[in-house]
Image (spheres, helix red, strand yellow):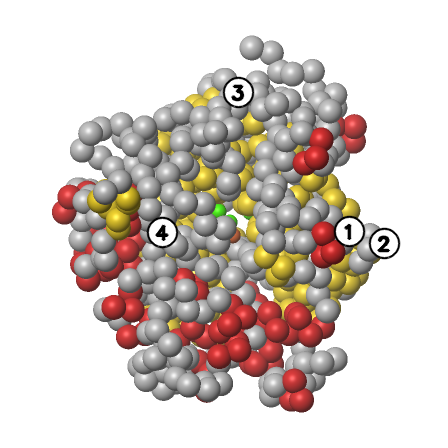
């Protein structure tokens, strides 16, 4: 099969036909091999996965649920041997626990979870660090790997940076305001230049139930973050998720978490200097002056894009010297102007409106209420900012804006140009002087997403883009070693339209700019996460989240939906196995770089 006449495209592969069915599809000439499924062993002593007898103890030794971010940290500088780091964003009890969902009088009814089931859910959250190795062209998990680790909703963590020890993060279980149990709803993430693993806490609000005591000082703060949302049954068994009992606990979530993967006993650190939002991810790049810049999306309708610039500089020769870079720096929020310029506005206590008169007594207050700080400085309200990816090859930054059904016609602006934005868009930023630490820059819309054959959608894919090549709802993305952009999506899976989520290759340069091609698509009911290229571009790992989910389409994640699509049993296709989220390793048959 020949590659499409490419009109200057940086990509060469035969495009996958869009469609929807029980399994995944990858471009011809490539293998897509299941590497890690929910329940697979992460340690040599892990019990075999048995969906009818799953326990928290077993789950703590096994791969967690709903793999989202995938990162790779080479061991000994190798592109074929390293640590795979994977976030487990959330759980879908209706897909995990046989018999939980019943049909009564034609209506779906989902029972309350038992404590044992809640414990399984908590152990299925968090992240996995696992050694992997390529042998004869195929990736294998190394269950004996000495760095292998599961991080869960019960792993002890430290709050570090300006918020550590503040009264607003003290609880009855932690008078120090520094010791937090667990991380929640880790969506996208990152790997730092010094080889630590970043887990971004996104929709933390959904885990909290109960009511704050009357006239509680945190009421307005929590309202801004949608706390509580009662998407989980955890507060029935654990007081820390009950606002009436532990009113400060939600201030201990919504942070960027950094994990030292080279020490399996290290205590993960919640780096409060990067702000408290529904953090989508934190992808980074070393600027010319050696400072490290982290780009951050806050995934909510009408919320903001941020970046964090370290005070210190990266030392490539001394890993230990970088280990606390994330505790000191400047957090900025983006203002996109109508004329295509932009400013990064500093969120620094005492500057502009971020003063005691507005309820910010210190930088800790600014960070705990990052969103309100962004409101006051006049940041641009965006259409759900997801992954934000710097590109070290062309010097640009790509912002995935997934959608915003609630934007009204009188709320459109140049950076969010469509009312009731159903399909999302991608913005390309060029920092002034090609300097990632710059406080001003230029921006333009790279793509307005959606079906270009439907005029009223207003999509702007190039005319070279085929009926398979367009997509909506950009979510995670990656830039490969060649500087090419790849976008994965959340929300295209729809039996009525006959399409699914997938991984698309998107040209950004020259005549082919805004041309997109479908490389991989997921089974029915799934969404597409990852993607992650190995440093040699010979493997792309993708994460298939919630295959077989036929649930209601909640716009925010972190809440269970209630239907199972029984037309797939991916990836095992066995009657006694549930559908399972899994990481897939894609390689070219016979070897070589992906998409070349
Ligand atoms: Fe977890 Fe914003 O997606
Ligand atoms: Ca996401
Ligand atoms: Ca990414
Ligand atoms: Ca997603």
Above or below, 25 against 334 in this view is: above
- Residue 468, quarter of picture: top right
Percent across and percent down for residue 350 are 69, 84
Mark 3 and mark 2 lie on one chain; the one further toward the N terminus is: 3
Mark 4 and mark 1 lie on one chain; the one further toward the N terminus is: 1
Kindly check if marks 1 and 2 are in contact, taking CB atoms under 8 A apart as contact.
Answer: yes
Residue at 73%, 28% (x, y): give it.
Answer: 462
Instruction: Give the alpha-carbon distance from disc 3 to disc 4, as whole Å.
Output: 30 Å
Instruction: Give the alpha-carbon distance from disc 1 to disc 2, as whole Å.
Output: 8 Å
Residue at 47%, 42% (x, y): give it.
Answer: 529
Residue at 77%, 51% (x, y): give it.
Answer: 414
Placement of the N terminus among the 4 image quadrants? top right
Instruction: Give the alpha-carbon distance from disc 3 to disc 1, as whole Å.
Output: 33 Å
Residue at 46%, 60% (x, y): give it.
Answer: 203
Q: Say which of marks 1 and 2 sits in front.
A: 1
Q: Which mark is residue 414?
A: 1
Kindly check if marks 4 and 1 are in contact, taking CB atoms under 8 A apart as contact.
Answer: no
Mark 3 and mark 1 lie on one chain; the one further toward the N terminus is: 3
Horizontal placement of 22 versus 94: left or right?
A: right
Q: Say which of marks 3 and 4 sits in front.
A: 4
Nearest the viewer among 469 and 165 is 469
Which residue is denoted by mark 4 in the rendering?
A: 560
Percent across and percent down for residue 313 are 64, 65
**What is the secondary structure assignment of the residue under circle 4?**
loop
Which residue is denoted by mark 2 in the rendering?
A: 339
**What is the secondary structure assignment of the residue under circle 1?**
loop
**What is the secondary structure assignment of the residue under circle 2?**
loop
**What is the secondary structure assignment of the residue under circle 3?**
loop
Which residue is denoted by mark 3 in the rendering?
A: 17
């Amino acid at each position: 099969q020949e590659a499409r006449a490419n009109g200057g495209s940086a990509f060469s592969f035969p495009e996958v036909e869009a469609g929807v069915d029980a399994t995944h599809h990858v471009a011809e000439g490539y293998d897509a091999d299941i590497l890690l499924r929910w329940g697979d062993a992460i340690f040599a002593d892990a019990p075999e996965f048995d969906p009818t007898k799953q326990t928290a103890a077993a789950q703590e030794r096994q791969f967690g649920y709903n793999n989202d971010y995938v990162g790779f940290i080479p061991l000994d500088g190798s592109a074929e041997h390293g640590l795979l780091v994977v976030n487990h964003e959330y759980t879908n009890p209706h897909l995990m626990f046989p018999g939980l969902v019943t049909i009564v009088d034609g209506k779906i009814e989902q029972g309350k979870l038992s404590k044992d089931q809640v414990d399984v859910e908590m152990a299925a959250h968090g992240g996995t660090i696992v050694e992997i190795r390529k042998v004869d062209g195929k990736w294998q998990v190394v269950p004996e790997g000495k760095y292998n680790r599961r991080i869960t909703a019960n792993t002890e963590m430290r709050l570090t940076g300006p918020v550590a020890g503040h009264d607003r993060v003290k609880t009855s279980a932690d008078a120090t305001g520094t010791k937090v149990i667990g991380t929640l709803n880790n969506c996208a993430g990152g790997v730092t230049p010094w080889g630590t693993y970043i887990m971004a806490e996104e929709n933390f609000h959904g885990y909290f139930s109960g009511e704050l005591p009357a006239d509680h000082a945190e009421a307005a703060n929590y309202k801004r973050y949608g706390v509580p949302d009662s998407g989980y049954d955890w507060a029935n068994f654990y007081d820390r998720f009950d606002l009436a009992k532990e009113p400060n606990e939600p201030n201990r979530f919504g942070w960027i978490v950094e994990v030292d993967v080279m020490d399996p006993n290290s205590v993960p650190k919640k780096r409060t200097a990067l702000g408290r939002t529904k953090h989508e991810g934190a992808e980074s790049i070393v600027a010319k002056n050696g400072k490290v810049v982290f780009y951050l999306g806050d995934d909510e309708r009408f919320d903001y894009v941020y970046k964090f610039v370290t005070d210190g500089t990266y030392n490539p020769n001394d890993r230990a010297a970088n280990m606390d870079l994330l505790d000191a720096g400047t957090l900025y929020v983006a203002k996109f102007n109508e004329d295509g310029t932009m400013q990064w506005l500093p969120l620094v206590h005492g500057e502009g409106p971020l003063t005691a008169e507005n309820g910010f007594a210190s930088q800790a207050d600014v960070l705990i209420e990052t969103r309100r700080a962004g409101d006051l400085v006049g940041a641009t309200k965006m259409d759900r900012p997801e992954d934000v990816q710097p590109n070290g090859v062309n010097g640009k930054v790509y912002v995935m804006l997934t959608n915003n059904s609630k934007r009204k016609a009188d709320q459109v602006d140049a950076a969010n140009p469509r009312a009731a934005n159903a399909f999302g868009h991608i913005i390309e930023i060029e920092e002034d002087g090609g300097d990632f630490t710059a406080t001003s820059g230029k921006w333009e819309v790279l793509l307005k997403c959606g079906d270009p054959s439907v005029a009223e959608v207003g999509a702007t894919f190039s005319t070279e883009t085929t009926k398979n090549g367009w997509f909506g709802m950009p979510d995670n993305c990656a830039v490969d070693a060649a500087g090419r952009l790849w976008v994965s999506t959340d929300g295209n899976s729809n039996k009525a339209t006959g399409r699914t989520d997938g991984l698309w290759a998107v040209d950004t340069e020259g005549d082919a700019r805004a041309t997109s091609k479908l490389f991989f698509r997921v089974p029915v009911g799934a969404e597409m996460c990852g993607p992650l290229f190995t440093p040699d571009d010979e493997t792309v790992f993708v994460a298939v989240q919630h295959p077989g989910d036929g649930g209601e389409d909640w716009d925010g994640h972190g809440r269970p939906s209630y239907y199972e699509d029984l037309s797939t049993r991916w990836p095992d296709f066995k009657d006694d196995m549930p559908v399972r989220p899994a990481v897939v390793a894609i390689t070219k048959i016979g070897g070589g770089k992906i998409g070349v």
